[in-house]
Image (cartoon, helix red, strand yellow):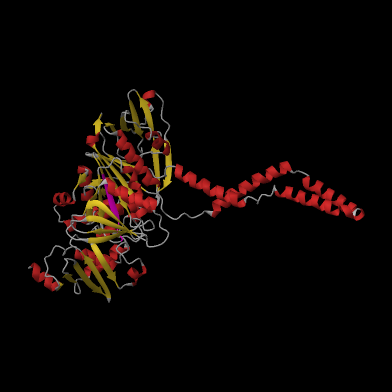
């Protein structure tokens, strides 16, 4: 998707009498003219949070692949340069050497005693020629090239500018990592600002360069900082007309879909564990000191009710006991991959009061929310780097966001109120939850809203200045298959409650047997299906087949039933129980 950004000028820090203005230039192609002006009460905390958001943006845990085409293009230019240098040094040298060799050969026929001496001279001359061989330093040049690429990538701000939204109650900054496996959202309450003018609500991209990040690093305790989002730029007051800066970016489809999948995942049920900063420090400290060189590479969280949280790091088998106590209703164990990406939370340790970890289950994402007083930093981590928020996931279906019936009514309602809970949306539209979810999903999949993982509210936010192409939000083939499976009825559906309070749901369609185990918290703990599509993948909830998705959709309607433990209930048994 091609997107055009237009800024009045680059964002910058301006030194004014008694204060520093952090001037952020919004995208002028937006239909809503966003503006904001307010002095920060805690500029250093804001600085550290924004720099941490930058760390998320440039984070890339994917395996690096060498681009041989670009290297050999660079090498060809280097060879040509060296050949020109050689010609300047040894013009005519080869002809002179050959003449000397011929004269020497004539003399050798007469003077045999001088043959060895002349051959020694010839060998020395050849060594001198080798000094100018253009291929002699090939591997050194190759190493120099890759070092150049590595240094260049680390020093630049990624081309996808962060998204800023001015809400009635807060200002949020959203960003995605380079590998699209880490989502970051900084929410700053209005109480953090001393407003100098009435904000204009809306969403826009902001020009946030590496140079601006360096200027922010110079904030000090004695610095009075004013955050200003000004569509007209910051040179108008001086009488200088701004020169518009335009960016044309081919926005990856996965970047758009990833934002939408984050909202769907944030809407799923999970368990929450509250950690102190020292607990996050202990986790990051262990990861810094230990580099795994073989599989398995995961950390297993052991959560026992009323006891301290324990983490076992594999493949070391080392156990770490945290200060935090698990207060959930049921003991459980959770395995987490992609643990090294937890290191992005290190920059928040000096300023965070506490951390809340939300675990969604085996193979599912995790959310880390840092409490920073009037600010909240939410970090969403996919289950592992190679499995981003789009590949093999179906969070839209799992959250009930199938189709887009009622999209227009939901869009107008959210645009009017800017943020609402799902319950308030249902009440305003006069629908139950199952009827309202497709309309909410239609808004989310079009990038016109998102689920705030911090408070669970659905907030209005237009991700792009132009409408997202239909192929990026239309109902997928997996959703069509789920609909067909759910329309076939529940003749083979059954549910059993185990002695420890877990629900076991079973179903069968066309000899494909599906089983799903959900605990009392509504979290998927185990699953299996006999179909080939599920067994070709990683066989966990991050890559479910349509059979499992359809069974999950049905199971959510019955997880609140009080069933006799150990007894299997068919559809007819459930209907009799309800009647």
Residue 441: x, y in percent?
25, 54
Asked whether residue 510 appears in the rendered view, the answer is no
Residue 499 relative to residue 120: left or right = left
Question: Residue drawn at (29%, 57%), measured in percent from left and top?
Answer: 311
Residue 547 relative to residue 7: left or right = left
The furthest residue to the bottom: 511
Depth order, front residue of 350/20: 350
Depth order, front residue of 576/569: 569
Question: Residue drawn at (83%, 51%), measured in percent from left and top?
Answer: 117
Residue 232 vertical placement versus 346 (above, below): above
Quarter location, residue 214: top left
Residue 226: x, y in percent?
31, 30
Residue 512 relative to residue 426: left or right = right
Question: Residue drawn at (81%, 53%), measured in percent from left and top?
Answer: 119
Asked whether residue 511 appears in the rendered view, the answer is yes
Residue 543: x, y in percent?
32, 63
The furthest residue to the left: 579
Residue 535 vertical placement versus 365 (above, below): below
- Tell me which segment is drawn in magenta: 363-370
Asked if the magenta segment contains residue 366, the reply would be yes
Majority SS type along the magenta span: strand
């Amino acid at each position: 998707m091609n997107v055009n950004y237009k800024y009045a000028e680059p964002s910058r820090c301006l030194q004014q009498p008694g204060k520093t203005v952090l001037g952020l230039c919004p995208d002028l192609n937006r239909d809503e003219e966003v503006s904001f002006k307010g002095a920060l009460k805690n500029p250093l905390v804001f600085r550290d949070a924004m720099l941490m958001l930058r760390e998320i943006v440039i984070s890339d845990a994917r395996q690096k692949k060498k681009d041989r085409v670009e290297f050999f293009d660079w090498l060809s230019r280097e060879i040509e340069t060296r050949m020109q240098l050689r010609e300047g040094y040894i013009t005519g040298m080869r002809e002179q050497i050959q003449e000397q060799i011929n004269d020497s050969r004539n003399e050798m026929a007469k003077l045999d005693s001088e043959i060895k001496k002349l051959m020694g001279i010839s060998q020395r001359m050849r060594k001198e020629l080798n000094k100018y061989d253009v291929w002699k330093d090939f591997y050194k040049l190759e190493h120099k090239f890759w070092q150049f690429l590595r240094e260049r990538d680390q020093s630049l701000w990624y081309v996808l500018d962060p998204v800023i939204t001015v809400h009635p109650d807060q200002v949020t900054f959203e960003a995605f990592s380079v590998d699209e496996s880490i989502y970051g959202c900084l929410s700053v309450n209005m109480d953090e600002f001393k407003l100098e003018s009435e904000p204009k609500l809306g969403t826009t991209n902001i020009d946030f360069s590496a140079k601006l990040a360096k200027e922010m690093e110079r904030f000090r305790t004695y610095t009075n900082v004013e955050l200003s989002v000004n569509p007209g730029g910051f040179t108008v007051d001086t009488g200088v007309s701004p020169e518009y800066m335009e960016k044309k970016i081919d926005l990856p489809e996965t970047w758009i879909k990833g934002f939408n999948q984050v909202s769907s995942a944030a809407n799923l049920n999970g368990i929450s564990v509250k950690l102190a900063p020292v607990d996050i420090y202990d986790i990051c400290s262990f990861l810094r000191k230990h580099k795994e060189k073989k599989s398995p590479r995961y950390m297993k969280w052991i959560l026992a009710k009323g006891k301290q949280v324990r983490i076992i790091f594999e493949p070391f088998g080392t156990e770490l006991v945290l200060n935090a106590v698990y207060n959930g209703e049921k003991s459980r164990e959770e395995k987490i991959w992609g643990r090294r990406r937890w290191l992005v939370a290190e920059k928040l340790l000096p300023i965070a009061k506490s951390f809340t970890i939300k675990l969604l289950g085996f193979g599912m994402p995790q959310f880390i929310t840092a409490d920073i007083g009037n600010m909240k930093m939410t970090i969403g981590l996919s289950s592992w780097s190679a499995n981003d928020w789009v590949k093999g996931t179906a969070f839209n279906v799992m959250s009930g966001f199938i189709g887009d019936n009622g999209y227009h009514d939901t869009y107008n309602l959210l645009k009017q109120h800017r943020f609402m809970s799902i319950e308030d949306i249902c009440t305003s539209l006069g629908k139950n939850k199952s009827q309202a979810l497709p309309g909410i999903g239609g808004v989310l999949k079009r990038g016109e809203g998102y689920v705030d993982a911090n408070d669970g509210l659905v907030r209005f936010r237009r991700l792009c200045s132009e409408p997202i192409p239909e192929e990026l939000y239309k109902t997928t083939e997996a959703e069509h298959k789920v609909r067909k499976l759910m329309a076939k009825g529940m003749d083979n559906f059954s549910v059993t409650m185990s002695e420890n309070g877990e629900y076991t749901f079973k179903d069968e369609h066309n000899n494909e047997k599906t089983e799903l185990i959900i605990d009392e918290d509504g979290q998927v703990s185990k699953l299996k299906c006999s179909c080939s599509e599920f067994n070709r993948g990683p066989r966990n909830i991050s890559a479910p087949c349509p059979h499992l998705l359809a069974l999950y959709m049905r199971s959510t309607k019955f997880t609140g039933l009080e069933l006799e433990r150990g007894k299997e209930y068919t559809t007819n048994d459930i209907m009799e129980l309800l009647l």
